[in-house]
C-alpha cells in the first residue's frame, strides 16, 4: 500500500511549482520574438518526454490497465493540461505582457471554486472565499502599482483573451485530476499525459512552420528549451499533481496566487525592475489569503 500523501510536503511542492511556472512566463515573454509559440510548446514537452522515458515508462506500463480504464479522462487531461494550457499561454504572450499573463493566471483559483462546486459538489467555505478575495487583492495591488484605476484601463487584446482561455483550461485540468484512480503512479501518469500533449501539439507546430514562422537554434534559445522542458514541465507537473492529490483541487489551485509574488521578485533580480511599497503590501496580502485557504477547518 502506498503511503498517504503529506499535506506539509504538498504545500512545499506547490510553492516550488509556482516558482517554476513564474519563471516560465518570464522566459517565454523574454524570447517571444525569437521562438514561435507552438515551437516553444512542442520543444518543451519533447524534452520533458525524453527526460521522463527512462524513469516513467516502467510505471506507466505497469499501470496500463488502470490508465486504459480511464483512457478518456487521461487523453483529455493531456490535451488540455499539457497541449492546451501551454500553447494558449505562449500564444498569448506574443501579444500581451508577462504582467498581464501572471495577473490573468490569478483568476484560476477563483475559477476552480465555482467550477468545483458546480460540477463536483465541492463545498466552499466562507474562509476560502475570503482567502481567495484577499489573495487576489494582493495580486491587483502588485500589478496596478497601488493604483486600482490602472486595472480598469487594461486593454483586453487578443493575448489577454488567449490567456483567459488558458486560465479556464487549467481550472478544468485541476478539477479533472481529482477523478483519477489514486492507484495510478503519478510519474507514469505524467508520461502518459506528455505523450498525449506532444501528439496534440505536433499538427499545430506544422501549421505554424508552414505559415512562415522561423526558429534559430542559438545558445540562448537552446537554454530556454532546457529550462521550460525541465522545471515548469517535469518537476512542476509532478509537484502539482501530488499537491492536488494531497490537499484537494481548491487548495492546490490557490497556490497559483504565489506566481505574481515570484514574478515580481524575478523581474527585480533579472530585469532590474524596482521593488516598491505596493509589492510588499501585495505579497503580504497574498500570503494571508493562502493561509486562510490552506488551513484545515
Image: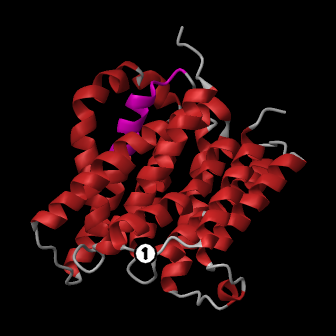
Q: What segment carries the magenta color?
A: 183-195
Residue 72 place in picture, x, y as percent: 52, 42
- Between residue 118 and residue 240, name the one nearer to us: 240
Above or below: residue 194 compared with residue 218: above
- Between residue 173 and residue 14, name the one nearer to us: 14
SS for callout 1: loop
Question: Taken as a whole, is the magenta stretch helix, strand or loop?
Answer: helix
Is residue 263 visible in the rendered image? The answer is yes
- 112 relative to 131 in the view: left or right: left
In percent of the image, x 83 and y 55: which residue is there? 130
Whether residue 126 is in magenta: the answer is no
Q: How many marks?
A: 1
- Between residue 113 and residue 295, name the one nearer to us: 295
Q: Which residue is mark 1?
A: 273
Outermost residue toward the front?
277
Residue 93 place in picture, x, y as percent: 41, 75
Report crowding for label 1: few under 14, some 14 to 19, many 20 or more residues within 10 A (C-alpha): few
Residue 284 place in picture, x, y as percent: 67, 57
Above or below: residue 264 compared with residue 7: below
- 10 relative to 26 in the view: left or right: right
Above or below: residue 285 compared with residue 16: below
In percent of the image, x 24 and y 33: which residue is there? 53
Residue 66 place in picture, x, y as percent: 49, 24
Above or below: residue 63 compared with residue 283: above
- 280 relative to 191 in the view: left or right: right
- 218 relative to 93 in the view: left or right: left
Image quadrant where one finds the C terminus: top right
Amino acid at each position: 500500500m502506498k503511503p498517504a500523501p503529506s499535506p506539509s510536503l504538498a504545500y512545499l511542492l506547490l510553492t516550488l511549482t509556482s516558482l517554476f511556472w513564474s519563471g516560465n512566463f518570464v522566459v517565454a515573454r523574454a524570447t517571444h520574438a525569437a521562438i514561435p509559440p507552438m515551437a516553444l510548446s512542442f520543444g518543451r514537452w519533447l524534452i520533458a518526454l525524453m527526460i521522463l522515458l527512462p524513469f516513467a515508462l516502467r510505471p506507466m506500463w505497469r499501470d496500463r490497465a488502470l490508465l486504459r480504464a480511464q483512457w478518456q479522462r487521461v487523453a483529455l487531461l493531456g490535451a488540455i493540461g499539457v497541449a492546451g494550457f501551454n500553447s494558449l499561454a505562449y500564444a498569448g504572450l506574443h501579444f500581451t505582457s508577462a504582467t498581464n499573463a501572471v495577473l490573468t493566471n490569478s483568476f484560476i483559483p477563483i475559477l476552480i471554486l465555482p467550477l468545483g462546486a458546480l460540477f463536483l459538489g465541492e463545498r466552499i467555505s466562507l474562509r476560502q472565499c475570503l482567502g481567495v478575495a484577499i489573495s487576489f487583492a494582493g495580486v491587483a495591488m502588485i500589478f496596478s502599482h497601488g493604483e486600482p484605476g490602472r486595472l480598469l484601463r487594461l486593454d483586453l487584446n487578443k493575448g489577454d483573451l488567449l490567456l483567459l482561455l488558458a486560465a479556464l483550461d487549467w481550472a478544468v485540468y485541476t478539477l479533472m485530476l481529482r477523478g483519477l484512480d489514486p492507484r495510478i503512479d503519478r510519474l507514469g501518469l505524467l508520461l502518459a499525459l506528455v505523450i498525449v500533449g506532444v501528439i496534440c501539439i505536433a499538427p499545430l507546430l506544422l501549421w505554424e512552420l508552414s505559415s512562415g514562422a522561423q526558429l534559430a537554434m542559438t545558445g540562448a534559445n537552446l537554454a530556454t528549451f532546457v529550462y521550460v522542458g525541465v522545471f515548469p514541465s517535469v518537476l512542476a507537473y509532478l509537484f502539482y499533481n501530488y499537491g492536488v492529490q494531497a490537499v484537494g483541487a481548491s487548495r492546490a489551485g490557490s497556490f497559483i496566487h504565489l506566481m505574481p509574488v515570484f514574478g515580481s521578485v524575478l523581474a527585480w533580480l533579472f530585469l532590474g525592475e524596482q521593488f516598491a511599497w505596493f509589492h510588499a503590501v501585495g505579497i503580504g496580502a497574498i500570503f494571508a489569503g493562502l493561509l486562510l485557504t490552506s488551513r484545515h477547518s
